[in-house]
């Protein structure tokens, strides 16, 4: 098996994330009953994002290198105040904000973006190898959506 650098892995993760959920990429057939699955392949790398739910959702992203799992991230997100934001609007803010973050060549926190009357925030600790983070949306000075994520390298 050949090797990859963390820089190559980061570049693929950003590219795959931009091409799938944020880029409204094609969905693949679900691997598990009731899941929504997105997939991207570039050379020896494969990205699979599999999640359940809509306004409240849980999922996992896995990166394979030469068909072996090498990196993963779990996440759980939910609408905190459905009276202030509809799930479709939260999704719109998230896609717009993440698209801007990915243009910067990264996917981990320390990011803020305004979309209309909503502000998206992302913060994290750690790096590509091991991290935890949180994203949220504020509208009218109220936190209306939140997602918690964590992940890192997978080693034998």
Image (tube, grey):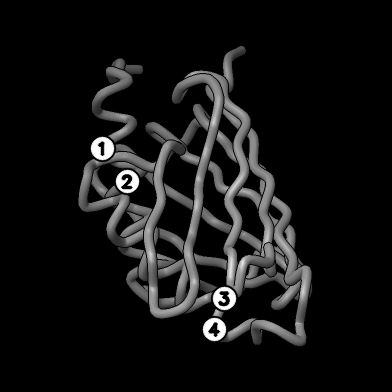
Q: Which mark is residue 89?
A: 4
- At horizontal 77% and vertical 75% (from top left) the residue drawn is 81
- At horizontal 31% and vertical 63% (from top left) the residue drawn is 19
98 or 156, which is in the foreground? 98
Local crowd size for mark 2, using a 10 Å CA cut-off: few (<14), some (14–19), many (≥20): many
Question: Which picture quadrant has residue 56?
Answer: bottom right
Instruction: Name the residue carrying label 3.
Output: 90
Q: Secondary structure at mark 2?
A: helix
CB within 8 Å, label 4 to label 3: yes
Instruction: Name the residue carrying label 1.
Output: 11
Local crowd size for mark 4, using a 10 Å CA cut-off: few (<14), some (14–19), many (≥20): few
Disc 4 to disc 1, C-alpha distance:
28 Å
Question: Which picture quadrant has residue 33?
Answer: bottom right
Q: Quadrant of the N terminus?
A: top left
Disc 3 to disc 2, C-alpha distance:
21 Å
x then y, percent, for residue 138 = 59, 65
Question: Which picture quadrant has residue 115?
Answer: bottom left
CB within 8 Å, label 2 to label 1: yes
12 or 31, which is in the foreground? 12
Instruction: Name the residue carrying label 2.
Output: 14
CB within 8 Å, label 3 to label 2: no
Q: Quadrant of the C terminus?
A: top right
x then y, percent, for residue 126 = 52, 20
């Amino acid at each position: 098996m050949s090797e990859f650098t963390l820089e190559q892995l980061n570049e693929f993760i950003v590219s795959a994330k931009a091409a799938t959920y944020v880029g409204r990429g094609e969905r693949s057939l679900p691997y598990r009953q009731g899941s929504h699955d997105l997939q991207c392949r570039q050379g020896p790398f494969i990205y699979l994002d599999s999640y359940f739910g809509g306004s409240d959702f849980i999922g996992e992203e896995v990166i394979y290198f030469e068909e072996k799992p090498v990196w993963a991230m779990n996440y759980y997100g939910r609408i905190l105040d459905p009276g202030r934001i509809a799930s479709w609007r939260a999704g719109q803010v998230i896609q717009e904000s993440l698209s801007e973050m990915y243009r910067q060549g990264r996917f981990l926190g320390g990011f803020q973006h305004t979309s209309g009357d909503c502000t998206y925030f992302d913060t994290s600790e750690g790096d590509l190898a091991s991290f935890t983070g949180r994203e949220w949306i504020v509208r009218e000075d109220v936190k209306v959506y939140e997602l918690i994520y964590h992940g890192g390298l997978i080693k034998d």
